[in-house]
Image (tube, rainbow, N blue to C red):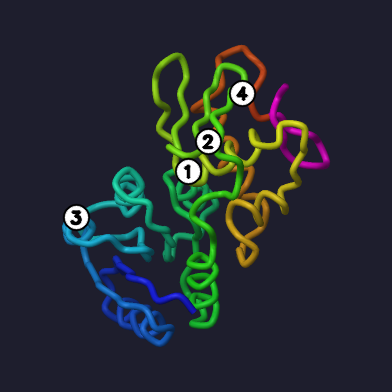
Amino acid sequence: MREADVLVVEDAPEFAQMVTAILRKGGHRVRTATTIADAVEALAATAPDLIVLDLTLPDGDGLDLCRTIRERSNAYILVLSGRDDEIDKLLGFKLGADDYVTKPFSPRELAARVEALLRRPRVAETTSAERMVGHVTVRPEAREVEIAGQLVDLTRIEFDLLDTLSASPKVVFTRAQLLERVWGPDWYADDHVVDVHVANLRKKIDRPGAKSVVRTVRGVGYGITT
């Protein structure tokens, strides 16, 4: 089992204590923050492997903090919230969350999801050569995507999806295959999360009026437009 540095951002003492106990039982080192300001300070002072993030915080919306974390850190983000509306979940994924667990939750489920995230490879296993995908340049070793001389800001998941698809342009991947390659074999989620991240990726790399770089194959999954 991998030991990790975890930042728990939660203002409710009972939940903070419960989550901390679950994580420490799993062998992880835990630091807590109760506000967005405290979390930003902790993020600047440390380099956590995983951030457990509540959305309802006293000094702002946790979704805004999720965006800030993703801009500054490559840490896994697990949202832990009482907000169970689909729009909150989709927005969380759009802003860079890797998983979303609603309260109340079982300690076993939380522990399993944490371990699944930490076992997930941070980088998809694909070839390293620079490649062109239509008007998009993908540089796997530098983890860069460029369009018309400008670098495109992608989340880790968005880059790994594009990298995986573009490395095998003749292959159509099922959602289950993409979940295993990008999220890892122990990922606990339905394949709808793939659709959310593909949609976000398309918004960043597609040209208006042109065919999408990532094509949908109905009843199968996704591939690269050739």
Report which residue position mark 4 lands on.
Answer: 133
Mark 3 packing: few (<14 Cα in 10 Å), some, or many (20+)? few
Report which residue position mark 3 lands on.
Answer: 44
Residue type at tag 1: Lys
Discs 2, 1 touching: Cβ within 8 Å:
yes
Mark 4 packing: few (<14 Cα in 10 Å), some, or many (20+)? some
Q: Secondary structure at mark 4?
A: strand
Image check: 134 left or right of 57?
Answer: right
Discs 4, 3 touching: Cβ within 8 Å:
no
Magenta stretch: residue 16 in it? no
Lower position in the chain sequence, tag 1 or tag 3: 3
Q: Nearer the viewer, mark 2 or mark 3?
A: 3
Camera-side residue: 38 or 172? 172
Lower position in the chain sequence, tag 2 or tag 1: 1
Image check: 197 left or right of 3?
Answer: right
Quarter that holds the C terminus:
top right
Residue type at tag 3: Ala
Q: Kindly identify the residue that appears in the image at 60 percent across and 60 percent down.
A: 184
Q: Secondary structure at mark 3?
A: helix
Magenta stretch: residue 217 in it? yes
Image check: 156 left or right of 167?
Answer: left
Q: Which residues are magenta?
A: 215-226
What numbered label is drawn on residue 200?
A: 2
What numbered label is drawn on residue 46?
A: none
Q: Kindly identify the residue that appears in the image at 35 percent across and 58 percent down.
A: 55
Q: Residue 121: image x %, image y %? A: 53, 58
Residue 113 to residue 208: above or below: below
